[in-house]
Amino acid sequence: EVQLVESGGGSVQAGGPLRLSCTASGFTFDDSNVAWYRQAPGNACERVSRISRFGDIYYHDAVKGRFTISRDNAKNTVYLQMNSLKPEDTAVYYCAADKLRSPTGPFSSCPYYSAMNYWGKGTQVTISS
């Protein structure tokens, strides 16, 4: 059974850090692109960051310099270190994986299986001012 499980969400004050983890099982993880998407109420599903199976990294302009994505293939895990968090970072964060695709979006909602094959259930991140 394919699974992506996110963890590490929570509530913090603006300026604080959080680290999200996404642990995969049931498919060849190290041969897959992995992305973090987020969706806030009333907003579209947008890609926050992506790390390709080759290690190429992308960040949304809104998080550049504050977020860092990394992967540990030995643990089948991708991390998203989020620093200097802002209230506008509040959203449900989803991990997604696909062997070939990792589109930017935005999409109408997360998860969006037309974009990537595998999705987690999401983890809530709430930033208070």
Image (cartoon, rainbow, N blue to C red):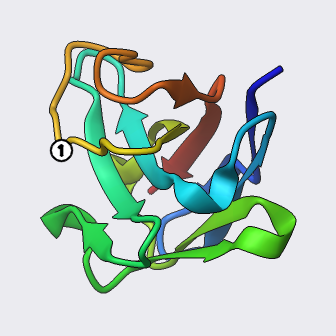
- Left or right: residue 65 versus residue 73 is left
Position of the N terminus by quadrant: top right
Residue plotted at (20% across, 22% down):
107
Q: Position of residue 4 (x, y in %)?
A: 71, 35
Q: Nearer the viewer, residue 8 or 111?
A: 111
As drawn, 107 above or below 10: above
Q: Nearer the viewer, residue 11 or 96?
A: 96
- Left or right: residue 113 versus residue 10 is left
As drawn, 117 above or below 24: above
Q: Residue furthest bottom?
A: 65
Position of the C terminus by quadrant: bottom left
What type is the residue that disc 1 sits on? Thr
Q: Position of residue 124 (x, y in %)?
A: 62, 35
**Picture quarter containing residue 77?**
bottom right
Residue plotted at (65% across, 35% down):
123
Residue plotted at (26% across, 68% down):
59
> How many numbered discs?
1
Q: Position of residue 88 (x, y in %)?
A: 31, 49
Q: Residues within 10 Å of mark 1 (few under 14, many from 20)?
A: some
Which residue does the numbered mark 1 point to in the structure image? 104
Residue plotted at (48% across, 66% down):
14
Q: Position of residue 104 (x, y in %)?
A: 18, 44
- Left or right: residue 66 versus residue 62 is right
Q: Nearer the viewer, residue 126 or 57?
A: 57
